[in-house]
Amino acid sequence: MVEYSESGLDEVFAAVADPTRRAILQALSERPATIGEIARPFSVSLNAVSKHVMVLERAGLLRREVHGREHVCRLQARPLEDATAWLEHYRQFWEVRLDALEHYVSNKMKSAKKSRARKETITHARPH
Amino acid sequence: MVEYSESGLDEVFAAVADPTRRAILQALSERPATIGEIARPFSVSLNAVSKHVMVLERAGLLRREVHGREHVCRLQARPLEDATAWLEHYRQFWEVRLDALEHYVSNKMKSAKKSRARKETITHARPH
């Protein structure tokens, strides 16, 4: 009855629940980078960035390649596909709400038009 | 440079990072339910379910209506739209990988066909 722990979703959602980690993914979506390069625009320590990188790595969102003393990090977007697929089920609910809103606005506009047209008819019908 | 804390995304992603909370949302996507009804299929205490419900409520994913002594919970899917919008940026990366895989498989199949055709030609060319 109860749909339990789809592999990886816990780690992926927890990983992207942090704004620094989302910013790291955003930066890596532009180009691969070393830990030092990733850390540069942040006001947090290299050590703190390293920890964020480890969380992303465990969630499968980042691959680290060791070139001598440098660790180059690359985005791995694949697990985000599963996250999106999970969210997809809920699209119907927010889209229904948007449909209802659109319907409401279009009805309001129609009745505003009608009442304006009625007023104009009355105005024109008055003897000058 | 660094895109920081889009309002609500932290809470929404953290809320759905837990399998019990995802299961609660799944149940509420079928129908609104009281805390007791939500708790029934789970092996955790009513108190634990209450805490999960509070996390979902704080993230804006659940609305609680008090009818006398009963709290009826309803799904609020709207914040999941923002989460999906954030993830949307990464679609290009997993789709590029799928494209590359499709290209690889189709090339492999073409070259397998060619080599089979060549073999058949050689077999047919042999004198009986």
Image (cartoon, coloured by chain):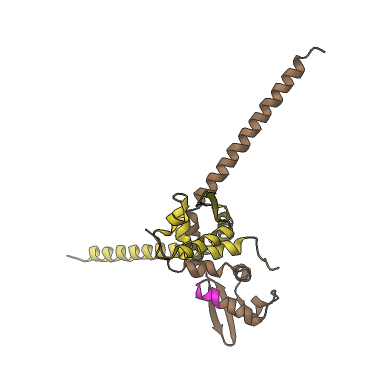
Chain colours: A yellow, B brown
Who's the residue at 68% across and 30% down the image?
Answer: B112
Who's the residue at 62% across and 78% down the image?
Answer: B49
Question: Residue pushed farthest left?
Answer: A128
Question: Residue pushed farthest top?
Answer: B127
User: Does the rendering let one see residue A90?
Assistant: no
Q: Is residue B119 left or right of residue B102?
A: right
B94 and A124: which is toward the camera: B94
Q: Quadrant of residue A79?
A: bottom right
Which quadrant is the N terminus of chain B positioned in? bottom left
Residue A74's x, y, as percent?
Answer: 51, 51
Which quadrant is the C terminus of chain B positioned in? top right
Q: Quadrant of residue B14?
A: bottom right
- Residue A80 among magenta residues: no
Residue B100's x, y, as percent?
Answer: 56, 41
Give the magenta part as a residue range.
Answer: B54-62
Residue B90's x, y, as percent?
Answer: 50, 53
- Count of marks, rendered view: 0
User: Does the rendering let one see residue B126?
Assistant: yes
B59 and A25: which is toward the camera: A25
Who's the residue at 60% across and 80% down the image?
Answer: B50
- Residue B55 among magenta residues: yes
Question: Residue pushed farthest right?
Answer: B128
Question: Residue pushed farthest front?
Answer: A69
B75 and B18: which is toward the camera: B18
Residue B71's x, y, as percent?
Answer: 58, 82
Q: Is residue A23 left or right of residue B106?
A: left
Who's the residue at 51% across and 68% down the image?
Answer: B12
- Residue A119 vs B48, above or below: the answer is above
